[in-house]
């Protein structure tokens, strides 16, 4: 079995994809923050993914700013 790169999954898969939601649940706070930074650095065109990640950070008690 291979290891999935969670940051890559969060920043490339559609937010409605079950693999995205699975990666989001397994991700650490740092991985989520890294994925958000990567998506914003790439033009911030992935608003749905960014919002889903920020919502997960809020749910975990951190601000996704």
Image (cartoon, rainbow, N blue to C red):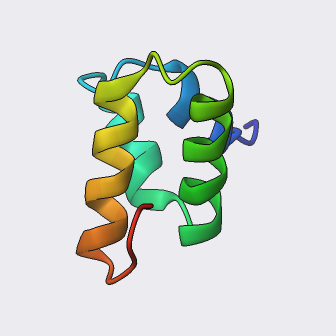
Pick out the residue farthest to the bottom. 61
9 shown above or below 31: above
Task: Say which quadrant the N terminus sits in.
Answer: top right
15 shown above or below 5: above
Find residue 55 and report its image quarter: bottom left
Instruction: Give the left or right position of residue 48, taking residue 8 as reference.
Output: left
Expressed as whole percent of the image width and height from the top left, the position of residue 50 reads 40, 38
Instruction: Give the left or right position of residue 24, taking residue 41 as reference.
Output: left
Residue 51 in view in this figure: yes
Of residue 47 and residue 10, the one placed in the foreground of this image is: 47
Task: Say which quadrant the C terminus sits in.
Answer: bottom left
Find residue 6 and report its image quarter: top right
Of residue 37 and residue 7, the one placed in the foreground of this image is: 37
Which residue is rendered at x = 55% and y = 44% of the image? 36
Instruction: Give the left or right position of residue 60, taking residue 2 as reference.
Output: left
Expressed as whole percent of the image width and height from the top left, the position of residue 48 reads 28, 27
Of residue 2 and residue 53, the one placed in the foreground of this image is: 53
Which residue is rendered at x = 35% and y = 54% of the image? 54
Expressed as whole percent of the image width and height from the top left, the position of residue 63 reads 38, 72
Which residue is rendered at x = 23% and y = 23% of the image? 16
Residue 9 in view in this figure: no
Expressed as whole percent of the image width and height from the top left, the position of residue 3 reads 74, 42
Which residue is rendered at x = 56% and y = 29% of the image? 11
Please count the marks in the image.
0
Pick out the residue farthest to the right. 2
59 shown above or below 15: below
């Amino acid at each position: 079995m291979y290891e999935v790169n969670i940051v890559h999954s969060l920043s490339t898969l559609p937010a409605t994809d079950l693999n995205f939601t699975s990666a989001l649940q397994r991700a650490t706070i740092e991985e989520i923050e890294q994925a958000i930074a990567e998506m914003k650095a790439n033009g911030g065109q992935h608003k749905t993914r960014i919002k889903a990640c920020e919502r997960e950070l809020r749910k975990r008690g951190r601000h996704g700013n």
